Amino acid sequence: MLAALGLALASPTAWPAAPPANPAVLTAASADLDAKATELVQRLVLDRAASLARAQRKADEREQDLLDQLERKDRQLRRSLAAAQAGSTQMAQLRTELAGVTAERERLVTELTGRDRAFQAELAEYRRLVAELANSPNPERRAALERYADGDRSGAFATLKELTRIEEAAGEKAVKLRAAARHREQAALAADMKDRADPGVTTLTVLEEWEAAAERDPAHFETWIYLTRLRQEAGRTQPALESAQRARAAATTDRERAWAASDLGNIQQAAGDLAGARTSYAESLQIRQRRAADNPSSEVAQRDVSLSLKELADVQQAAGDLAGARASCIESLRISQRLAADNPSSTEARRDVSVSLSMLGNLQQAAGDLAGAHASYTESHQILQRLAADKPSSAQARRDLSVSLMKIGDVQQAAGDLSGARAHYAECLQIDRRLASDDPGSAWAQSAVSVSLERLGDVQQVAGDLAGARASYIESLQIRQRLVADNPSSAEAQRAVSVSLDRLGEVQQTAGDLAAARTSYAESLQIRQRLAADNPSSAEANRDISVSLNNIGNMQRIAGDLAGARASYAESLQIRQRLAADNPSSAEARRDVSFSLENLGDVQQAAGDLAGARASYAESLQIRQRLAADNPSSAKARRDVAASLNKLGNVQLASADFAGARASYTESFQIRQRLATDNPSSAEARREVVASLVKLALVPGSSVRWKDAYQAIQAMKNDGVLAPSDQQLLTTLKKMADAEK
């Protein structure tokens, strides 16, 4: 009979495939248990597995028959052993046969536990608690446990009570695990409903389901990953950091540990902790590089390395390390290109190449290489066009195409090709509108439309189409306000509304509607103050307040309220100085301080405090010179230095320090001339050269004449890169040049 049972259990067709179970559920006794206690625990666990499988119907009819047969055979053999003479041949044979039965029972139970995580967990907990009882220093308790195993439950009443407690505790854990699984299932449905903007379902709804799952199953790794991302979306940075740390603790594999480190880096970067983020990303990268070295043929392992390099490049760029960011980005791109070449039919591999090219374009644009950026964005776009053609029904492919069009539009706008930028933004908007029309309940699709409208408004404003810009910004704002109404617990959605209000305020201010602009800026500030109060550890939320304070300060200065403007600028400066002190590795934080100092200098100069203005401008200049020295490849950093020199020249000119003004303006002009030479496609760079020539023409004793400034701006018009808003400047400079003759 035993041989027949063994054949049935060993047959490859007898059982469905199942993942390997944890052998500690069945054996693996603690080192402090003696052999007899180990055997007793093993026996009790196998008996419990059979009764639990029967009660919970974990086994099918054939499996349950096998369990019952093996259990009966086990008891029969033990009775025979008890009656056999010690040391006899019969006893040796019985022990061998009992060991075989036990092995067959273990194998069958392993199959069952491998198919049901909750069953496995309950059995593992039962084994742990029974082992505690079996290891009791009280011999009466162990003897009672042995009687319980022999079936004398009435005679082992005290043991029975203890085992009842054990079974209840194990059952409670299994119940919690099953409940956690149900909450995870409900969270997935709630997330889908939120994305479809179903009434009453918000980020908080999804978050509550994941928090319930975490409470019941704190060892589940992915639960903490989802909690991290949702808490960040809800504007809860500190709890998000705590979730990321819990994910790290729950990780059991290298891939999970790398994943957790990556997510922790994302939250640290959002909180403004760039040094911490860089450390976390580097940790993730090291783990993934080790896995890739151990598995050189694994596409997944190689791709993970590429993703970590992208994350590292992102934080390096945020810290102002453009050279380091470019190196990381190019290494990531090469991995993606190699994977795509090895697997040309892989959509994911080709998409990864396009993402790396887009990131390279971002870095090239930040360094002032607009031609290089345009080439990278175009190559990325061409890949995405082919992917969209291969899968015309794919919403993701069309959305990717829209984003790539936006990138090309951005670099065209920076180069002064406003008509090209407008055409690309319009095409981007058409794609996004179709996607939103195809899925009207998708919050993601509606948000994409709002972003495209915002970009279109930007280029309309630069081109002088203020009515068009205002209409685009208002439509974008209305979409975002609806998204907030549908999901009021989303900090991201609320922040997007504040950004739209800022954009609307800018165009209202440009159009001369100062009262409306002030209202828009004030409403934006109120939203940002609420978000920062709800999430005080968020660097982004606090920085947003400083931006709003600057906007309000600008309005106050225009209205002649210099005291009010000075107070707003000073408050903004204090916030930015605090953020820079908290994150000294952030180039952007230090740059923000320099702008606040510049604003403060403007209002000091307007109030006649030339000494104060000069000190503010000089401090701003020093910060920018250090940033440019730290990152010599950054066109933006050098451009900022030139702007500071112009500000310093202004106050020197107002103080009749003509030699000082001429020196500052000349140095600014030389920087701008080099930038325009390095990047001849940049309309912005050429316009700033014109501005420097105008400044120099104003200084007594300067060799620069009005005709020099006029010829430079006329050349821009001839090349088709003069913005409509600069037409009046062209006319004015022509008059000044004619007057010189």
Image: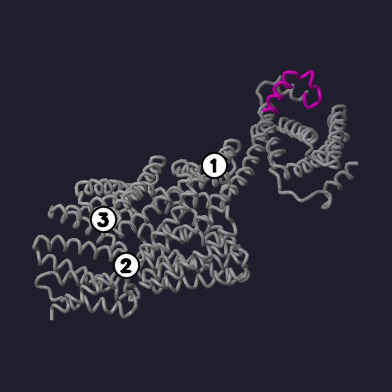
Under tag 1, what secondary structure? helix
Residue receiving disc 1: 207
Magenta region includes residue 161? yes
Amino acid bearing label 2: Ala
Q: Is residue 369 above or below residue 1?
A: below
Q: Residue at x 79, y 33 (%)?
A: 55
Mark number for residue 594?
Answer: 3
Amino acid bearing label 1: Leu
| Label 1 vs label 2, nearer the camera | 1
Q: Nearer the viewer, residue 693 or 726?
A: 726
Where, quadrant-wise, is the C terminus in this rendering? Answer: bottom left
Q: Residue at x 26, y 45 (%)?
A: 571
Q: Are marks 1 and 3 in contact (CB under 8 Å)?
A: no
Q: Main secondary structure of the magenta part?
A: helix
Q: CA distance from mark 1 to mark 3?
A: 39 Å
Residue 661 position by quadrant: bottom left
Q: Earlier in the sequence, mark 1 or mark 3?
A: 1
- What range is drawn magenta here? 148-168
Amino acid bearing label 3: Ser
Residue 487 in sight: yes
Residue 414 position by quadrant: bottom left
For mark 3, does the 10 Å Cα neighbourhood hold few (<14), some (14 to 19), or many (20 or more) residues? many
Q: Is residue 40 above or below residue 571?
A: above
Q: Are marks 1 and 2 in contact (CB under 8 Å)?
A: no
Query: Which percent across, then down, holds residue 138?
Result: 67, 21
Mark number for residue 83?
Answer: none
Query: Which percent across, then down, holds residue 632?
Result: 30, 66
Residue 25 in sight: no
Residue receiving disc 2: 635
Query: Which percent across, then down, holds residue 420?
Result: 42, 73
Q: Earlier in the sequence, mark 3 or mark 2?
A: 3
